[in-house]
Amino acid sequence: MLAVQVLGPVRAWRDGAALPLGPAGRKAVFALLALAHGRPVTRGELVDALWGERPPPSAANVIHTHVKHLRRLLEPGRGPRSPSTTIPTVGDGYALDLPPEAVDAARFRSLVARAGSVAHDEPRQAADLLTGALGLWHGRPLADVPLLAAHPGVVTLAGERRAALARHAELMTAVGAARDVLPALVEDVAAHGLDETMHALLIRAYTAAGQRDRAFDTYHVMRRRLLEELGVGPGPELTAAYLDALEETPDDDAPTGAAPAPAGVSQLPGDVPGFTGRQAELAELGRVLATERTGVPVVLVCGTAGVGKTALALHWAHRVRSHFPDGQLHVDLRGYDPRSPVAAEDALVRLLDGLGVTGADVPVDPDQRAARYRAELADRRVLVVLDNASAVDQVRALLPGTSSCLVLVTSRNSLAGLVALHGAHRLDVDQLPTSDSVALLRALIGERVRREPDAAAELAERCGRLPLALRIAAELVASRPGSTLAALTRELADRRHRLRVLDTGDDARAAVRTVFSWSYPQLRPEVARAFRRLGLHPGPDVTPPALAALAGTDRDEARRSLDVLARNSLVRPVPGGRYVVHDLLRAYAEELAVEHDPAPERLAAVDRLLAHHLATAAAATALLYPVDHPHRPDAPVAPHAFATADAARAWLDAERPTLVALCRAAERDDRPGYAVDLANTLYRYLESGHYADAATVHGCASRAARRAGDDGLLAVALTNLGALSRLLGDYDRAARHLREAIGLHRRTGGRRGGPRALSHLGIVLERLGEYEEAVSLHREALAAHRRLGSRHGEAAALLNLGNAYNRPGHHLRAAECLDRALDLFRLLDDTSGQASALANLGDVCVSLGRYPDAVRHLDAARELFQRLGHSYGVAVTLSNLGNAHTRLGDRSRAHRCYTSALETFRDIGHRYGEASALNGLGENLRAGGRLDEALAAHTDALRIATETGDQDEQDRARTGLGSTRSQA
């Protein structure tokens, strides 16, 4: 009884015993005959398949010899002169005469045909038949005969398998078994990166399996790939699958990957003190809240500058907090700030932070970020306040996907597109009625309003009945208790100074600016100068040290000036010792600065601000990452001293939005040197998990350097950008950036940056499976560090080289490199380096079977990483400890190690670590007989490794899936 396999490596068995088919050429002849399913194959067809257009003169003899050996192998009992019945000669060729069920390709086609005949009436039976058909495959057709890879029969057969896989996925999804087809679909889309049909099927399978976050990730990765490689967007099939995923209601029992929002989270600023009037508007907002709705409810509060839109929105938001128990989110979009409006992608970072999605969990891709935001809000009752929007594009990506949330937008514009396309309910806010204006003045000033009601009404009119102007005027009145309201009102009416009005003919704005110009001259000179400087600050808020740098004063004076400005309602204090400036006041301050301060003085003020933040960031990162000093620029001014590492990190966390804004400003103002220096200074801090902000900062630095034509700066910026792409698992993009950076470093003589770029590229190529080139790059980096006399660089390069050698046949060499690295790190007293070397040495000992040594090294590494607060290092050591304990047979301890490591890798967004830990977990689960869980772990690992291009973990996942299926 003969059995033949062509669906994978070419094999043959007689009565269960494998037959030695011989060299590749003989296997090729045998496979071609098997693919013909009994049809004769001529010698010419065989010769053409084996040699193409240039066959050797002996081709016919070689074919005949191969057939002779195959006949002897397949018919050992046949006499020397008896005709062959298994491979008979037919005309000018041969045939393989076997029953159809003897060849796996024939059985596959028969099962597919049977499935097609019953699919309409019996989808479950059809799915089972296709499961059997696909189970016959063990790899590519004729996998070990590469010379036939392009043969029409092989190509056709591979296409039939993909068609069967697609139909199988459709049926399994339809009958509720989508989870079972995920491994095969993930593997197929990895091999066919631009096939929209298979990607759409994978998205639908993920959705049906309750894994909508992975469905969204798959869509966005494919969308970006289509755009980058073909210059087109997703087609209708892919788009439909994505839209269905958006609309699908998640199964409560299915893992969606979205963590619950923190209960009662609120980003709302405080309610406005002394809020007065607006009863009709509040009633209308209440009616919108009570209305039954199907889509996402959006309310647009429109009105002129200073009319009190934000005050109304915040007052109502505080009143209805109980209607939104899952939280209230707020972001000031600063749409009318000419220097630094907030882009939607940056606003998403702040909104996700309010939902508990922080650091590396925030997707870098803007579309994926928006999808994660919608997933977090799905079926939750959250109020989203989007303040000061200037365009629909600022808002569109911030709209949730479900009707359980309500969005409140404030804008000076009508945002007609928001009404037309998203059904927003527009509420127009006009100036306060005179009675409400006087009531507000009475609440702010007191008895003087009651004593002079006519003057109070006149003052309200002079302020345009705008709450912002009324508040500033009230503060000035309160500061001059000896003057009557009538006298102060005449002073305002007689005032001849008028600032340029942004919108000619807008009396309301003119009134606001007039009140500003009335209040500003009352300030002491040093406070007035401080106010003007605020117009030059690009960040969302300001601190006393930042204002001190801008104004050229000490911090105590800056703090006193801010207190005076706050008492005059020209700035608003917020928690954390920070101050916010209304956008109209910021624009007014900038106009005053241009009018009163010479350009060199303004430039010097901005230079001091930039120098202050760069120096303070350098001081903070020096305390947190002391061994990274060769890559930090020299501080331009005396740095601020931090007492503890916690204080340094707290400053970086609080100032991160401002630091990002400064980097954007440096790009806009053609300051490439500053952009690159700031990006370099922040590299280690942002690398620790703030990947979305890192992408912005390094992107700004690289664009600024490229626009300036400064190759030296561009080399440094691209090195950082490439290193970030590596951390994000985007290995192709990382390789592009790093190869360009290496070329620039060599051209410009970047002696320190060059070895760093070489090392990062070596790590990328190692992950992509290009080991020889990776080793070559690490050796080049090692030699460069030695020439520079950099012992720390030498130790780091030895560490990377040892990691590159950690593969079969090279483990001893890996251990040697890592031992030398460990000695150097100890000599340098570098605790972090010692921990990394021990962790990797432990991994090598696992590969060498030295399990007790592995546990000893890894426990020591984990202790050092925990002492350093290095969560990524702890996760790596735990994952490697899991490998060691699995080999030692302690599956319970191994399982605890893997799950703890996996949680941390997911928290910090390290995808390679996540894939590795999942594969380890799968191996451990399989050893314990928990096969379904093992399949799920390896499937997840394969998906991640496929998306990142990590060859090692792909191979490990496929091996794990195959071993697990064979035991099932």
Image: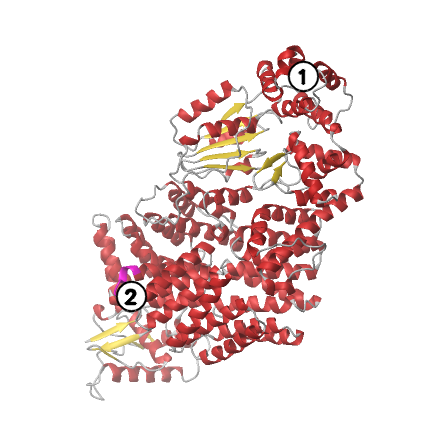
For this rendering, which residue is in front, 118 or 75?
A: 118
Q: Earlier in the sequence, mark 1 or mark 2?
A: 1
Q: Amino acid at mark 1?
A: Leu
Q: Position of residue 208 (x, y in %)?
A: 32, 48
451 sits left or right of 734 in the view? right
Q: Is residue 192 above or below residue 603?
A: below
Which mark, by number, is residue 584? none
Find disc 1 in the rendering and name its residue.
Answer: 459
- How many numbered badges does the structure rendering display? 2
204 sits left or right of 230 in the view? left
Residue 943 within the segment the image draws in magenta: no
Q: Position of residue 541 (x, y in %)?
A: 62, 40
Residue at 49% of width from left, 68% of height from top?
A: 835
Which mark, by number, is residue 926? 2
Q: Position of residue 172 (x, y in %)?
A: 28, 52
For this rendering, which residue is in front, 653 or 584?
A: 653
Q: Position of residue 482 (x, y in %)?
A: 72, 19
Q: Quadrant of the N terminus?
A: bottom left
The magenta stretch is 929-933
Q: Amino acid at mark 2?
A: Arg
Q: Nearer the viewer, mark 1 or mark 2?
A: 1
